[in-house]
Amino acid sequence: RMGVTETFAGISLPGHLHTQESLSFATTFQFRPTDVLIATYPKSGTTWMQEILTLMFSHGDVLPAKTIPNWERAPWLEQIYFRDALQDTAARRLITTHLPARVLAPALQQSKAKVIYVARNPKDVVVSFYHFHHLAKFLPDPGSFDTFLTRFLEGTVHYGSWFDHVKGWLGQRQHLDIFYVTYEELHQRLGAFLGCPLGPETLRALEEHCSFVAMRDNTMANYSLIPSEIMDHSQGRFMRKGVVGDWRDHFSPLQNALFNRLYQEEMGDSDLQTMSQR
Ligand code: PPS
């Protein structure tokens, strides 16, 4: 394991991908009004949204999505590769981040950049994140599922607390131009959501190309090109299952009760009250 950890704004991040320099570059980044930022807590539908937006911006032409890896099409703002990967010439720059709102809000408030926030049922997030820790050598050994779940609920896992992340970004709705959608909604009504200004051909390409199976088999989207020193592909696939409610196969009744109690405490008065029940 490449177990180096970088700490930033009270949050642990994989040191292999982040330095203090790349992080401060991110928080002072000059966004353009035409930029689109995908903001997510890990395992919430980031890669899916990157693919959807790639296809929207190319008007359904699948060539970029099939020939350029997603980390170049929609580079990670906070990572050391960002400066090199950013397509400065692109009409609409697509940028991705897992950073919390509190460190990015100032830079975003100064610009008119659009933010797309994708949230997912945190029970499915913790399951997906747990499996991803086995695959990603730049993340620490997760221990047992129960240990990992406890750390997830405490907010001490890499990328910090899910609760703070979601509340932080949704709390910026008055100040930023944010489009908010859930992974579950993408599942349910991708077609409808993609509907309005897109022609029938773009829509068809989107539906075909952005399905779980199509993305699972697209090397430019499924992270299979990442060398095995960084991701141990024998431990499973990045495109693992792609379903809603896989947590039901992982949580014990006790773990579920503990989770529900904390969820209610943290999210009870927000409009995300029912998200963890799906
Ligand atoms: S990351 O590492 O933060 O960028 O991961 P992220 O892309 O946010 O989340 C990975 C999970 O999303 C699933 N996925 C999809 N589900 C449905 N349809 C499509 N097209 C799709 N693409 C990715 C992926 O399988 C991970 O979820 P799990 O539950 O582990 O399968």
Image (cartoon, rainbow, N blue to C red):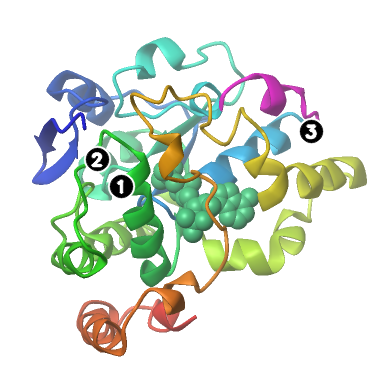
Q: Which residue is mark 3?
A: 59
Is 64 within the magenta? yes
State left or right for residue 274 relative to residue 213. left
Queried on whether the Cβ of the residue with tag 2 lies below 8 angstroms from ligand 1, the answer reads no
Task: Give the mark nearest the N terminus, 2 or 3.
Answer: 3
Q: Which residues are magenta?
A: 61-69
Local packing at callout 3 (Cα closer than 10 Å; few below 14, some 14-19, many 20+) is some
Q: Position of residue 154 (x, y in %)?
A: 13, 66
Q: Which residue is mark 1?
A: 133
Q: Quadrant of residue 78?
A: top left
Q: Which residue is mark 2?
A: 139
Queried on whether the Cβ of the residue with tag 3 lies below 8 angstroms from ligand 1, the answer reads no
Amino acid at the residue labelled 3: His
Q: Do labels 1 and 2 touch, CB within 8 Å?
A: yes
State left or right for residue 100 relative to residue 59. left
Q: CA distance from mark 2 to mark 3?
A: 36 Å
Amino acid at the residue labelled 2: Leu
Report the disc number at residue 100: none
Task: Give the mark nearest the N terminus, 1 or 2.
Answer: 1
Q: Nearer the viewer, mark 3 or mark 1?
A: 1
Task: Give the mark nearest the N terminus, 3 or 1.
Answer: 3
